[in-house]
Image: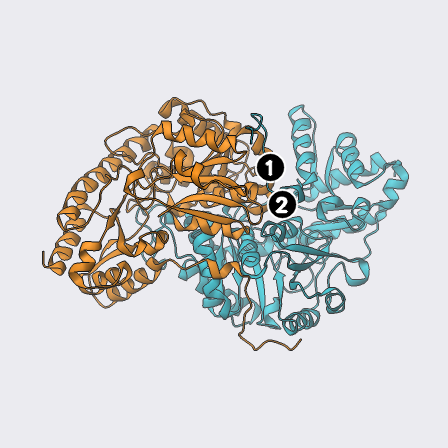
Chain colours: A cyan, B orange
């Protein structure tokens, strides 16, 4: 074999299937425009605009003030590794949180602390998915999900969903698409990008359907507590035979700390422990100490006030986007997203698709919005995702600019 | 299909190949004995006994004191996500560190910040290894390496190594084992578990051999600066066409922060960026701010003093273990490990293998040591790994207990 040209790179085939997020290019362009002095309203960003609550910051600083770490924190010093499954005190605190907040009994032994919900997804695909096996998921959906499955040589079975099922999978769709190579179905409630929820009875039906096939329902509850006009719920109230993904990123405003967790059936924990030992050793120790305070009463007050802010923003944005001609047939009840059919805007502007539209809105209106392409294929070119992760004032400015641009 | 029994779990086949670490069972037993009041000398632990240096802790506390984060830190607020490739300021600081410390020019654009070296290994296997393709590595070696390759459905090609090559691969071994499905060879210098180094000229020869086959040499420099009686070096001084894994865990005493980095050929960075966006979004932001201080002059003084402590410990432990009858034919010059052939101890005790020996030493002598089985198959049952991650005084106590147990 002759030596390859310098600078040539042969990569594994999976890399052809792992697309960049279109929003990253838009974000980079937005930063360029800002560097030129343009003002951009950001409605594309998938993380809360709020900083981590001060009680959490304070707890982190306090833990980091003791060189050998807090002795009562569960045995791990604050700058050393915790056990792979996580700090015992944090696992217990989460068990208490499920009990107090959702009235559901979850043994701390079933809770695995992970480096973000990303770490939980990595464990789950590694645990469950053999090569060429399939995980069913909704299209549109969170794009990384299909890439995690592809990463371990599995296949994502994308099921087109629309307004009729609230942009969600249901037991009927699982039955229609479950094949001999299917090992799991992954749902998110609330969903990114649609903000819609799944009814507990439907979740229970899906969980038992999956078990009856010898597989599992995986439930992404990353946006669990960010629901509006209702109280948060967990699938764990209706089924124990599921895997639940969760995170301190969104409701707890701790994105940068990279901390999440997984609730697993007890029989899965030893294998998850082995995978965690190998794949990441443990989640960040300082983050785990900080998170203890995130579950406390002081943080709760702050976080519930933020939840109200998100509700106010949604209540403002939803009707005005509809007035501007976007079709939003199912009311988003959670997360901080509105997924809108922009066919009318395409018709009005003569632009071909949502990517062209998002580009035009950024360049000409100074508003950054994520095109549907980042969430799948199904009618993606006719959808935009709006994130209300900026202040009400900025949202109003954004909407005014959109109205001007559209001549509305 | 009938529903499976409750509590039954079908897992992906790769889980059968991902063994638990034997040392975890030993460590759990050690904790049990300690809970019963026994004193255990820990010579099994693969992380520094030192806490993170105070200047790093202080930098972390300072960053966490500003709710909106340090404005000059590269654009990311301290509790929000950084770019997937890492905080620009940290990438620049590492480039400066390579220049000042090793006299080697590494463009910051080639440096990818990862959640521990584990995150770097995940990126590399995802980037390079297709299903059934092979990565060559030494046996004995760091056990997670082969599991990362297995995780993405690749195969670890374990090459038995011994004293004749310093327990390391060399260009001759690569030539002998490189097959049509081989895409990379992974070496570690210094090595875990053997503490041995690879000569720069040999690294250069391996790197160009791998490139000539269309593959890559991957170099684990996690223990890079922990070398004794010599100055640290980097493969980047002799080759640019390699991937280098590194970490803030060991030399910088930052295990619990979970922060590492990767130096890649420039053409690989866009694909690594896409993988990082999908697999972990970004490394911990507070950890990245803390790490900026780890590279500063104040920390360096502390870390170099610790390096001297490790050297003193090695200089004590190496001759006394030899006196006790262990065979250590190649002087370990780095990391904090001594890999010893314990055949004489097996003969003296009548025990069958190093696992039985490690168990007996824990139960009867109160000394915890890692059995060779955790590092591969090749003569593993006749080896023990000693870690000098505890004080000189404790090492002396441990050695006395070993001598008593052996009747030496």
Q: Can residue B247 be seen in this view?
A: no
Q: Which of these two is toward me, B191 or B102?
A: B191
Whether residue A87 sits left or right of residue A195 in the image: it is left
Q: In which quarter of the image is the N terminus of chain B?
A: bottom right
Look at mark 2 in the image and give the residue it sits on: A14
Q: Is residue A41 visible?
A: yes
Secondary structure of the residue carrying tag 1 is helix
Secondary structure of the residue carrying tag 2 is helix
Q: Determine which quarter of the picture holds residue A243.
A: bottom right
Look at mark 1 in the image and give the residue it sits on: B271
- Where does residue B355 sit, x and y in percent of width and height? 29, 60
Q: Which of these two is toward me, B379 or A236?
A: B379
Q: Quadrant of the C terminus of chain B?
A: bottom left
Share a chain, discs 1 and 2?
no
Q: How crowded is mark 1: few (under 14 residues within 10 Å), some or many (20 or more)?
A: some
Q: Which of these two is toward me, B338 or A140?
A: B338
User: In this rendering, is residue A239 above or below A288?
Assistant: below
User: In this rendering, is residue A37 above or below A312?
Assistant: above
- Where does residue B342 sit, x and y in percent of width and height? 22, 53
Whether residue A166 sits left or right of residue A214 in the image: it is right
User: In this rendering, is residue A47 above or below A26?
Assistant: below
Q: Residue at x 31, y 56 (%)?
A: A71
- Residue A28 is labelled as none
Q: Which residue is drawn at 49% across and 37% down?
A: B113
User: In this rendering, is residue B89 above or below A308?
Assistant: above
C-alpha distance separating marks 1 and 2: 11 Å
Q: Residues within 10 Å of mark 2 (few under 14, many from 20)?
A: many
Q: Which residue is drawn at 75% across and 38% down?
A: A398
Label 2 near label 1: C-beta < 8 Å? no
Q: Which residue is drawn at 55% across and 61% down?
A: B12
């Amino acid at each position: 074999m002759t030596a390859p040209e310098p600078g040539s790179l042969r990569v594994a085939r999976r890399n052809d299937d792992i697309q960049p997020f279109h929003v990253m290019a838009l974000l980079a362009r937005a930063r360029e425009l800002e560097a030129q002095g343009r003002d951009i309203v950001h409605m594309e960003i998938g993380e809360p605009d709020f900083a981590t609550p001060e009680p959490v910051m304070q707890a982190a600083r306090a833990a980091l003030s003791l060189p050998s770490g807090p002795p009562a924190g569960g045995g791990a010093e604050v700058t050393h590794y915790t056990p792979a499954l996580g700090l015992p005190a944090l696992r217990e605190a989460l068990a208490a949180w499920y009990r107090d907040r959702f009235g559901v009994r979850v043994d701390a032994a079933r809770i695995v602390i992970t480096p973000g919900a990303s770490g939980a997804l990595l464990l789950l695909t590694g645990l469950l998915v053999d090569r060429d096996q399939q995980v069913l998921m909704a299209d549109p959906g969170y794009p990384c999900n299909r890439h995690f499955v592809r990463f371990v040589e599995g296949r994502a079975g994308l099921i087109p969903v629309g307004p009729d099922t609230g942009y969600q999978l249901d037991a009927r769709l699982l039955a229609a698409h479950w094949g001999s190579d299917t090992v799991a179905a992954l749902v998110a409630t609330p969903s990114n990008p649609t903000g819609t929820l799944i009814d507990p009875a439907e979740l229970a039906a899906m969980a038992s359907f999956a078990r009856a096939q010898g597989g599992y329902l995986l439930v992404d509850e990353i946006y669990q507590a960010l629901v509006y006009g209702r109280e948060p719920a967990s699938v764990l109230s209706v089924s124990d035979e599921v895997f639940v993904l969760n995170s301190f990123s969104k409701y707890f405003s701790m994105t940068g700390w990279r901390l999440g967790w997984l609730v697993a059936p007890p029989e899965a924990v030893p294998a998850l422990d082995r995978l965690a030992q190998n794949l990441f050793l443990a989640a960040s120790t300082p983050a785990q100490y900080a998170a203890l305070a995130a579950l406390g009463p002081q943080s709760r007050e702050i976080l519930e006030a933020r939840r109200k802010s998100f509700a106010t923003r949604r209540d403002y944005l939803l009707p005005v986007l509809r007035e501007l001609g976007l079709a939003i047939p199912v009311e988003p009840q959670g997360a901080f997203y509105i997924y809108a059919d922009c066919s009318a805007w395409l018709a009005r502007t003569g632009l071909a698709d949502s990517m062209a539209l998002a580009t035009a809105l950024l360049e000409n209106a100074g508003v950054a919005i994520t095109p549907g392409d980042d969430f799948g294929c199904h009618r993606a070119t006719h959808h935009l995702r709006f994130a209300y992760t900026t202040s009400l004032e900025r949202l109003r400015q954004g909407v005014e600019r959109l109205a001007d641009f559209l001549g509305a």
